Image: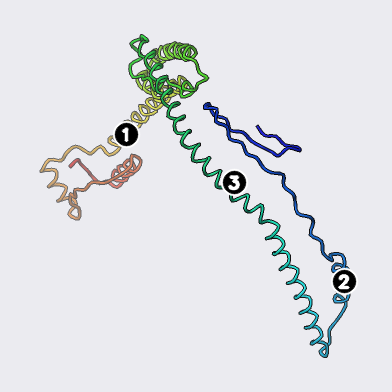
Amino acid sequence: MCRAGKNPPCCFLKYERKCEMELKVNEVVLPAPITFNYEELKAELLQKVSVYETMVYTEDQVKSAKSDRAALNRLKKALNDERIRQEKEYMQPFTTFKTQVGELVKIIDHSVSIVDKQVKEFEEQKKAEKLQQIQDFFNSKTFPGNFDGLSFKQFFDEKWLNASASMKSIQEAIDVKIEQIAKDLAVVDSLPSYAFEARECYIDTLDLARAVSEAHRLQEQAEKKSAWEAEQQKRKEEAAAAIKPTPVMTDTNDQRDIENFPSRKWIGFQAFLSVDEAKALGAWLRNNGIKYKAI
């Protein structure tokens, strides 16, 4: 509680032990305004400024210019020196008050930290007790067989530990969540394909839409894979047909080829080709009358 007005401001700290501390501040008499020949100096300076703004010193007047500059700097120094002196004297009472208040605040902060530690320990203890009550209630529930893999951590909501959350509301929330999860798992388990993978996804996220989406993704992926494998098999068969070798020659035929084509001989090799390249190679060999066979 703070009071202001004619009476000095004061604040109270009350304890259960009926211990009361009160801050009493005596009425502060503020210093009188600092007066000096401000208007006189200002008028004189402005008059000189108007002269300096239009004056152009000649070489003969350099000594006079230096003298004017020195006079102005002396006045400037005198003003600043007096300002510093007056400020220090003017602020001294407040500086002392500020230091004293700082010392008291440090003592208060230390006391608050001691009390705060005990308050937090009490609050943590209450939260631990409440958490145990929630877990005991959860463990007392009977879950369907399809709840395998689900844990208390997936049901728990950190907000349940707030003092504003009653055990009745928490128990109702758990019952509602169990009912919803049972419905979601029934949907997941009824999926025509990839139900197991979808169930694993749901157990991790408790997100039905995401689990169903995962099953659909896996189904689409399987269909794409099947189509790709079929296409690869088709290409292999086409490649094999394109370079199907001529019947294996007997030794007699090989000898006859050598006699008929003395510039040719059988050369064994393997080639790393695509299906289209294999087709092109087979066509080129046939078009050029080159025999080939399997090795």
Task: Name which of mark 2 and mark 3 comes first in the sequence.
Answer: 2
- Residue in front for this viewpoint, 52 or 264: 52
The Cα atoms of the two marked residues, 2 and 3, are separated by: 45 Å
The Cα atoms of the two marked residues, 1 and 2, are separated by: 109 Å
Q: Is residue 79 above or below residue 135?
A: below
Q: Which residue is mark 2?
A: 44
Callout 2 touching callout 3 (CB < 8 Å): no
Residue 99 falls left or right of residue 268: right
Query: Which image quadrant for residue 187?
Result: top left
The Cα atoms of the two marked residues, 3 and 1, are separated by: 95 Å
Residue 41 falls left or right of residue 200: right
Which amino acid type corresponds to the residue marked 3 in the rendered image? Val
Q: Which residue is mark 3?
A: 101
Identity of the residue drawn at 37% across and 27% down: 227
- Residue in front for this viewpoint, 244 or 78: 78
Task: Name which of mark 1 and mark 2 comes first in the sequence.
Answer: 2
Which amino acid type corresponds to the residue marked 2 in the rendered image? Glu
Residue 252 falls left or right of residue 181: left
Q: Is residue 169 above or below residue 25?
A: above
Between label 3 and label 1, give the one nearer the viewer: 3
Q: Position of residue 184 (x, y in %)?
A: 44, 14
Q: Which residue is mark 1?
A: 238
Quadrant holding the C terminus:
top left
Identity of the residue drawn at 59% across and 46% down: 101
Quadrant holding the N terminus:
top right
Going by the picture, which residue comes out furthest to the bottom?
60
Mark 3 residue element? helix
Task: Name which of mark 3 and mark 1 comes first in the sequence.
Answer: 3
Query: Which image quadrant for residue 35?
Result: bottom right
